Every structure is written in structure tokens, then in C-alpha cells.
Amino acid sequence: MTPQSDIALLLLHALPLDGRMWEHQRGIKPELTYAPNLYPFGDSLGDWASGCLDLVKQQQIVVVGCSVGGSCALEILNRAPERIAATILIGTKARHDPDPALFFRHLYVY
């Protein structure tokens, strides 16, 4: 069993924001907190999930996702359920569209 002190905190941002969205939360446990910018990982939720799983070296992760970050959190949970200690979703649908490009298209329709 992983000691609670070794559990990573992964904070996943909403669109069109980036990891800076979590600036104030990064201090909770700085040495174990990750708030990456998802966009450089690729063009799909699968790419983002893989990038996050590669980034976090700890075996156990609490994943917090806001909006599309929550969709990414669900994808991470789907890919590596054994690594997820808890998942917290903020403003996220239980089902997600696996293509982030669709989110961008909807943002700029107005």
C-alpha cells in the first residue's frame, strides 16, 4: 500500500485555460503536485491522458479535473485505474467527447 504522503495530486485545467489555473492550489503539497498544460501533449484526450500518466512518477494519483480537464481525468481513470486513488470532477459531464478540437470549435462559434 502506498503511504498517503506519496500520493500525487494531478490538477487538470479547463479550456481555454492552462495549468496556471491551479496556481493557488499548487502549494498544497508542492513536491507532489502537478498542474500541466495539456495542449503540448497532443490533440486528443488520449494523448493528454498518456502525457499526464508519463509525467506523474508516483504510483498513486488523486486526479482533479475541471471541465475538459475532467474529461481527461476520466480518460486517465479508464487507462490506469490501478493508479487512481481518487477522482474529483468539477463541471464535467460523465460522458466526454474524445476530441478536444470539438471543444475549441464550440468556444468560437459565437
Image (cartoon, grey):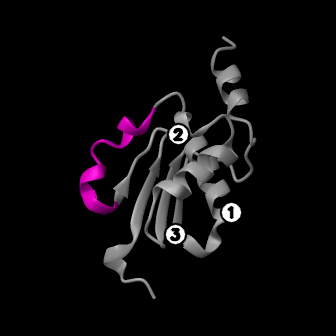
Which amino acid lies under the numbered mark 1 shown in the image of this protein? Arg
Left or right placement of residue 16 versus residue 9 in this view = right
Q: Which residues are magenta?
A: 18-32
Residue type for callout 2: Leu
- Where residue 72 appears, as percent x and y from the top left, is 61, 49
Q: Is residue 104 above or below residue 33?
A: above
- In this figure, which residue is indicated by the disc labeled 2? 38
- Label 3: how many residues lie within 10 Å, few (<14), some (14-19) or many (20+)? few
Give the CA separation, mark 3 to mark 2: 20 Å
Residue 22, magenta (yes or no): yes
In terms of depth relative to the viewer, which is nearer, 85 or 95? 85
- Tell me the chief SS of the magenta region: helix
Amino acid type, mark 3: Ala
Magenta-span inclusion, residue 25 = yes
Instruction: In the rendered structure, find residue 41 and report the number of the disc placed on it.
Output: none
Q: Is residue 35 left or right of residue 102?
A: left
Residue 33 position within the rendered picture, expressed as x and y whole percent measured from the top left: 35, 57
Give whichever of discs 1 and 3 has the lower sequence position: 1
Mark drawn on residue 86: 3
Whether residue 89 is visible to the viewer of this picture, yes or no, is no
* Mark 3 / mark 2, whichever is N-terminal: 2
Q: Nearer the viewer, residue 67 or 72?
A: 72
Going 65% across and 24% down the picture, which residue do you hit?
Answer: 104
| Circle 1 residue | 79
Question: Which element is circle 1 on?
Answer: helix
